[in-house]
C-alpha cells in the first residue's frame, strides 16, 4: 500500500492531484501487492475484487484484501482511502445504497446483459423484467485483476468520492457525477417482495433498468 501510494503521489502536493495520481494505479485493474516482502521474498501477488466469494463476515477490510488477495468493495474503497490519506489527498469513502425513486430497490446489478423479452413479461409496472426469463445475464463486467467477479448482484456498493467526482477502485472506473456513475456502472435494480437481501435469490425476481436520468441511489459519505 505504502509503495503504491508514495510512488504514485511522488512530487504532488495538491490534494486533488494526489488523488488523481494514485487512482491512475487502480484504473488499469492490475493492482498487485508489493514486488518483494519484508523478508526479501518475491511477492507481487495479483489482487482481485470478489473473485471467489466470501463467508458472511469475510472480505470487508483492507487487511483481509492484502492477506488473501481478494476483497469486497469496502476493502477496495479502504485501500484507495488509505493510499490517498497517507499522502494528504482529498475525498472520502462513500456507500452507494439502492433506494431509488420507487423506494423498492433491493440490490444493485452490475452486468451487461442481453434482454430476451424487450419490455419484460413481469406483472409489476415498475419492475417489468423477470430474473432469467426476460434477461440473459451472461458474464459480469471485469473488475480487479481484469477478472469478472463471482457475483453480479450486491446489497450496496462502496466507492470513493471527491466533490461530485466518483472513483470506483473495485472496477477501476471514474465518473464526473453520481448520475453518470449509476448510468454507466449499474444495469439496474431488483425488487423482491418479502426478502431483506438479494443473496440467495429465488429463480424469479422482479427487475428494472437504470433510469439513466435521475439519481437512483442514496450516496452516504462515511469518511
Image (cartoon, rainbow, N blue to C red):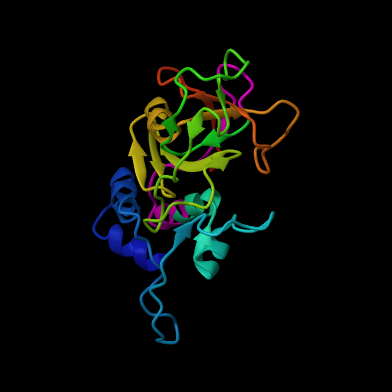
Report x, y in % for residue 161: 43, 38
Report x, y in % for residue 210: 46, 24
Taking the magenta stretch, the answer to whether it contains residue 135 is no
Q: In this view, does 142 lie to the left or right of 207?
A: left
- Give the quarter of the image for residue 162: top left
Q: Work out which residue is located at the far left of the displayed protein and give it.
A: 11
Q: From this view, report whether residue 56 is shown above or below residue 39.
A: above
> Which residue occupies the foreground of this view, 112 or 15?
112
Residue appearing at x 26%, y 60% in the figure:
10
Q: From this view, report whether residue 176 is shown above or below residue 78.
A: above
- Give the quarter of the image for residue 132: top right
Q: Work out which residue is located at the far top of the displayed protein and give it.
A: 125
> Which residue occupies the foreground of this view, 23 or 54?
54
> Which residue occupies the foreground of this view, 134 or 44?
134
Report x, y in % for residue 189: 54, 29
- Give the quarter of the image for residue 222: top right
Q: From this view, report whether residue 95 is shown above or below residue 57.
A: above
> Which residue occupies the foreground of this view, 54 or 82?
54
Magenta residue span: 80-105
Amino acid at each position: 500500500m505504502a509503495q503504491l501510494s508514495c510512488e504514485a503521489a511522488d512530487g504532488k502536493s495538491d490534494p486533488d492531484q494526489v488523488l488523481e495520481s494514485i487512482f491512475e494505479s487502480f484504473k488499469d485493474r492490475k493492482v498487485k501487492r508489493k514486488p518483494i516482502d519484508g523478508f526479501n521474498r518475491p511477492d507481487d501477488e495479483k489482487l482481485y475484487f470478489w473473485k471467489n466469494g466470501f463467508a458472511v463476515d469475510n472480505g470487508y477490510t483492507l487487511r483481509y484484501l492484502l492477506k488473501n488477495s481478494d476483497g469486497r468493495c469496502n476493502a477496495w474503497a479502504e485501500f484507495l482511502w488509505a493510499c490517498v490519506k497517507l499522502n494528504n489527498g482529498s475525498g472520502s469513502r462513500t456507500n452507494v445504497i439502492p433506494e431509488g425513486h420507487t423506494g423498492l430497490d433491493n440490490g444493485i446489478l452490475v452486468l451487461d446483459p442481453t434482454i430476451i423479452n424487450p419490455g419484460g413479461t413481469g406483472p409489476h409496472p415498475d419492475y417489468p423484467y423477470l430474473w432469467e426469463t426476460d434477461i440473459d445475464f451472461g458474464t459480469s463486467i471485469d473488475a480487479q485483476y481484469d477478472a469478472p467477479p463471482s457475483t453480479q448482484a450486491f446489497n450496496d456498493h462502496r466507492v470513493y468520492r471527491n466533490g461530485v467526482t466518483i472513483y470506483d477502485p473495485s472496477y477501476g472506473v471514474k465518473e464526473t457525477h453520481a448520475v453518470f456513475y449509476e448510468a454507466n456502472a449499474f444495469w439496474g435494480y431488483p425488487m423482491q417482495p418479502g426478502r431483506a437481501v438479494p443473496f440467495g435469490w429465488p429463480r424469479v425476481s422482479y427487475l428494472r433498468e437504470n433510469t439513466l436520468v435521475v439519481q437512483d441511489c442514496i450516496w452516504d459519505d462515511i469518511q
